[in-house]
Image (spheres, rainbow, N blue to C red):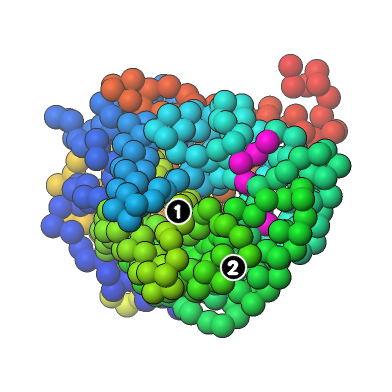
Amino acid sequence: MPLVSAVPDRPLVPDWLAAPKDANALAAGVWPASAHRDDQGVLEVAGVSVAQLRDTYGTPLYVIDEDAVRARAREVRRAFDAAAARHGTRARVYYAGKAFLSTEVVRWVTGEGLAVDVATAGELAVALAAGADPARIGLHGNNKSVAELTQAVEIGIGSVVLDSPIELERLAAIAERRGAVQSVSVRVNSGVHAETHDFLATAHEDQKFGFALTDAAAAVARIRELPSLRFVGLHCHIGSQIFGTAGFEESAGRLVELHAELLAGGEIPVLNLGGGFGIAYTSADTPTPIEQLADGIVDAVARECDVRGIPMPNLAFEPGRTIIGRAGITLYEVGTVKPVQVSDDLTRLYVSVDGGMSDNARPALYGAQYSARVVSRTSSAEPALARVVGRHCESGDIVVDAEYLPADITPGDLVGVPATGAYCYSLASNYNFVPRPPVIAVRGGAARVIVRGETIDDLLARDAGVSTEELA
Ligand SMILES: *Cc1c(COP(=O)(O)O)cnc(C)c1O
């Protein structure tokens, strides 16, 4: 572990972070739209007070605004529908389940007209338990097991996204033995890799997913030879937390060129451009509105099709984060507050909360930035530079790397971290044998458990050396 800062190569205070005029204010576009403070200054989400949530469920706690997820799912679907309709075609939106998966959430998004993407038997089990239509499920992954591929064929899954020549042959054999014809798409490594503001376009991208652009045509030719497989189209996914359309447009150009060549060998109903649309984690993030993204990407595909004189295919997209990210917040209770002198003229308040990298791995995993507020009260104290840290035995166990919080923040205060709906619960672990928190859905002033919290007994139950009597 580095000696000076837990996060190397970063200034002590990030340049985008300014001391706020009001350290109680909730940044627009970061918190759920329903979030506001009541007369006492306590945060309410979807009409439910966080003080009441703490009293009922304890902390740490994942809270999800159901209507926010539903509204966003509708908004995203309508944006792509409208953009596609302007070019006389259709768009299907798959919810990328890995962002956050539970049966409730699957029901919300499928209820709003989305299809679902899964990548493992476990994710598939959740989607099926929620009653998702197998014909509207896509199966991804670079190393799907024989058992997973077999189950996919047997339940009549909508499409399997092929990732390698070995998998292509494996799936063909499985489908043939069952007398089935499985629809497949081919994941192409477009050489475009995007991350937030920048994208990189290379001839050969050095990563594990998909077929190289130069190998995809041979894979498609092979699929077309095999009676047990039906080629439905090309797929690519260029990254995650992407702002702007440039990366998508570059990648769409490369994909449409290949799509046009492959049309010579037969029809291709769909072009799938993946997900990756960014959200705001802090007030410094300014994601592109979804209508603008949808129009920009779909217009780019239309231009590329026009140039080549080919018809517009149906389109598919796979957003995860942008559907559920902003709808979720995490509540923690402050346990200790410790000023640490980090340079001659800078003191940082280390605020330790009762969760950490076990409920939000993203800061430790990717250096992800979040924001935070004291949500159990307002304060008129001066804003102080703070770092919200977890309770785990790692100095990289950071929840919010840099934020201004009221200088009088104290044990017992509740801290809320917004924009934790995606890739927090799904990446949670039991590090240090900390039980994973429950997930609470809030809607119209009511709260309910959609995933119960783990108990110490849950953790002991898998240890073969613990007798069942001890657990009872
Ligand atoms: C993760 C993933 C997505 C969703 O990415 P988001 O950034 O959450 O929108 C879509 N498609 C594929 C293939 C993925 O792996």
Asked whether residue 223 is drawn in magenta, I would say no
Residue at the bottom extreme, as displayed: 203
351 lies left or right of 384? right
User: What stretch of residues is rendered in magenta?
Assistant: 156-162
> Which residue does the image show at 47% across and 78% down from the upper left?
200
Q: Is residue 466 visible?
A: yes
**What amino acid is found at the position of numbered circle 1 in the picture?**
Leu
Badge 1 is on which residue?
Answer: 315
Mark 2 → mark 1, Cα distance in angstroms: 19 Å
**What amino acid is found at the position of numbered circle 2 in the picture?**
Ala
Image spot of residue 145 (x, y percent): 78, 49
Image spot of residue 60 (x, y percent): 46, 37
| Comes first in the chain, label 2 or label 1 | 2
135 lies left or right of 27? right
In the image, residue 151 sits, relative to residue 422, either above or below, namely above
> Which residue does the image show at 82% across and 29% down from the upper left?
466
Image spot of residue 410 (x, y percent): 32, 44
In the image, residue 268 sits, relative to residue 462, either above or below, namely below
Badge 2 is on which residue?
Answer: 264
Image spot of residue 401 (x, y percent): 40, 61
